[in-house]
Image: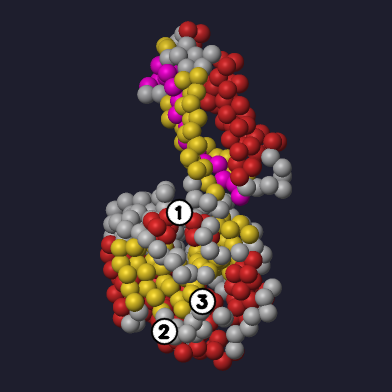
Amino acid sequence: MSKITIDPALQAEVLRLAREHFESIVEIRRDIHRNPEIGFEVHRTAAVAAREMRALGLKVKENVGRTGVQADLEVPGATRRIAIRADMDALPMDELRDKPYKSTVPGAAHMCGHDAHTAMLIGGARILKTLAPKLKTSVRFVFQPNEENLPGGAPAMIEDGVLDGVDEIYGMHVWPLHDTGRVGICRGPATAQPNEVYIEIKGVGGHAAEPQLAIDPILIAAQFLTNVQSVVSRAVDPQQPAVFSITQFHAGTTTNVIPESVKLAGTLRTYNKEIQALVRKKVDDLLKGLCAANGASYSLQFFEGYPVSLNALQSSDRVAAVMTQLLGAEHVRYPDRASMVAEDFGFYCEKVPGNFMFLGTRNLAKETGYMCHDPRFDIDEDAMVYGMAHHALVALSY
């Protein structure tokens, strides 16, 4: 781990400022939570971020990557620039839990915590503006749209120059698998590369009373669903993580008709391109064999999603050092295990070194243990103090 240390008095001041801004940052988070926006259509949320950055006197660019915001805290004489990124978009789903700041927009809800990410980055910027005389690196605050949907908002932000002049980038995700006051920091992969999988099995339709005259695609699909479980369990090295999940099965319109075709969809997630290629080939071989044996045909499509969020060693060591000093070694899991979730932060990691940290937000007394994308998801807002402190301390560690 890095030998980086933060002056204890400076660390105490960062925590004091984080707590001073806490109530205001919580209100910003709740305001965004009540007014969720999806994809690139994050106009209101982006306006909040731009307003708050301008209030700090930072140089602000709007409409970066269509609807993103970039704000720069320039440090005279600095030879380095780091970026800190937050995503702004919500999910196209409804929120189940009834709370004062519940979503007011049907079919949209912040069930992944991006409202908190945006608010914490605003809080981090406030702290760093106050402590600017202590900074030795310039800081770029990146508010990104459309993390949840392919092709992601990161490529558009990069194309518009958000990484120009940036040496390293940092980000985080609220994480209900860790308790509040704890963090997880990965070495190497932090999140996986997803592949969207689309399959159609074509048979011959017919009357359900005369199945011998049909080629039943439902039966073939059922055999495929059972047999495909052996691909990961038997064809992939147990020390090479991979997940293949079928999540959609569409067939038939009535009870007395064998349908002509079945459509399946799902996801393949890996950290390794060779394992990804192996699984794709094995799935194709399995479909080919089953369909040939039954006189059916098939189509198989894979669409690659975000790249792996690959944490750089030096960036990870830096985050681990400052968070260990802040929270204590017993509250920092380093290295943490990577997750099979996907994150378009990986696009940034392909361009510059970086680290993507998991911020613990689980507090069972507050019922904040539901995983991201669960309609009951929420965070323990007390964790936002540590998120703001993370942003500030990483920048101050240079």
Depth order, front residue of 158/198: 158
SS at badge 1:
loop
Q: Amino acid at mark 3?
A: Arg
Q: Nearer the viewer, mark 2 or mark 1?
A: 2
**N-term mark: 1 or 3:** 3
Picture coordinates of residue 223 (x, y %)?
Answer: 58, 25
Seen in the picture, residue 131 relative to 100 is either above or below; the reply is below
Q: How many marks do you count on the picture?
A: 3
Instruction: Give the CA distance from mark 2 to mark 1.
Output: 33 Å
Circle 1 is placed at which residue position? 373
Circle 2 is placed at which residue position? 129
Within-10-Å neighbours for mark 3: few <14, some 14–19, many 20+? some
**N-term mark: 2 or 3:** 3
Picture coordinates of residue 212 (x, y %)?
Answer: 51, 8
Circle 3 is placed at which residue position? 80
What's the magenta bit mostly, secondary-structure-wise?
A: strand
